[in-house]
Image (cartoon, grey):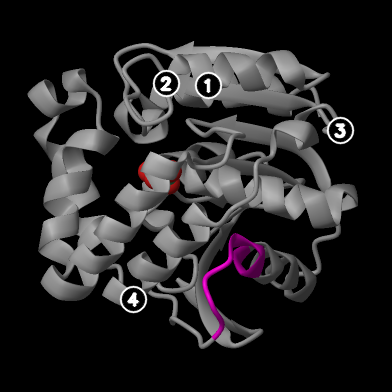
Amino acid sequence: MKKLKLNDVELAYREEGSGQPIIFLHAFPLNRTMWDDQVATFSSTHRVITFDWRGFGASSLGVTGSSLTVFADDLAELLNLLEIKRAILCGLSMGGYVAFAFYRKYADRVSAMILCDTRATADTEEGIKARFEMVNMVRQQGIPAITEKMVPRLLGETTLQTKPQIIEKVKQMIQAAQPEGIARALIGMAQRPDSTELLSKITCPTLVVVGNEDKLTPPSDAQTMNSAIGLSQLRIVNNAGHLPNLEEPLAFNRAIHELINLV
Ligand code: MLT
């Protein structure tokens, strides 16, 4: 793991392999290690970069507020410092929300997009209320309460019943986050704009991937995005919930392989 100072933060990142860059954007409230299987697989053919958003994993919190545009600007600056002009972006859930924010500002830097277990719509009023309840929860009760709430939501029933090592890995990632990092990301997600209009403006090759057991962003969200994006394909990963890259890495990697062979 290496660190780079940029904007008002120090971001922890990992870089392996060489060739066309693929940048993996992690979900809330996890960190770059959720992509370990993908780093191992794709670094034999690509330059693979994973990193922790501000306030997560080993990255610092920074002083700036919590808009997801700040996350997108961190990503742009990371690419500048690593001298990467264009990359394939793979974002899962919150990583997908940031991929939309990034595409809005820096479309010419994206050669292809992989949108996993995410959605283009903004939060509903009820969703925003639930986010702020979680902000209070993490500020008052800390990470254990968030871990207990998030683990059953993130993982599919198959994983919850049969893969204790994945449950443990997810818990460890949540425990590595900073409570205020979690609070700020929740506020950022609550305030994110609707990206539905953006979908028809996405002109790069795109892959939409979703776990068939995803409870947070179900396959219907993926189908909607896939229909609205011009050059898009949809892959559904069986026996996986919201984190198919961790729950069913072979099937997930196979889907990504098909897209990156097109780029
Ligand atoms: C994520 O996995 O990044 C989050 O669950 C997304 C969300 O809460 O909307």
Give the number of the disc on residue 218.
2
- The earlier-in-sequence mark between 4 and 3 is 4
Residue sitting nearer the eye, 112 or 67: 67
Helix, strand, or loop for circle 4?
helix
Quarter of the image containing the C terminus? top right
Quarter of the image containing the N terminus? bottom left
**Which residue is label 3 attached to?**
201
Looking at the rendering, the quadrant in which ligand 1 lies is top left
Q: What is the C-alpha distance between the residues marked 4 and 2?
A: 28 Å
Give the number of the disc on residue 221.
1
| Amino acid, disc 3 | Lys
**Which residue is label 4 attached to?**
180
* Residue at image coords 26%, 58%: 134
Give the extent of the magenta segment. 64-71
Mark 2 and mark 1 residues within 8 Å of each other at the beta carbon: yes
Q: What is the C-alpha distance between the residues marked 4 and 3?
A: 34 Å
- The earlier-in-sequence mark between 1 and 4 is 4
Task: Report which quarter residue 88 is drawn in.
Answer: top right
Residue 48: say if magenta. no
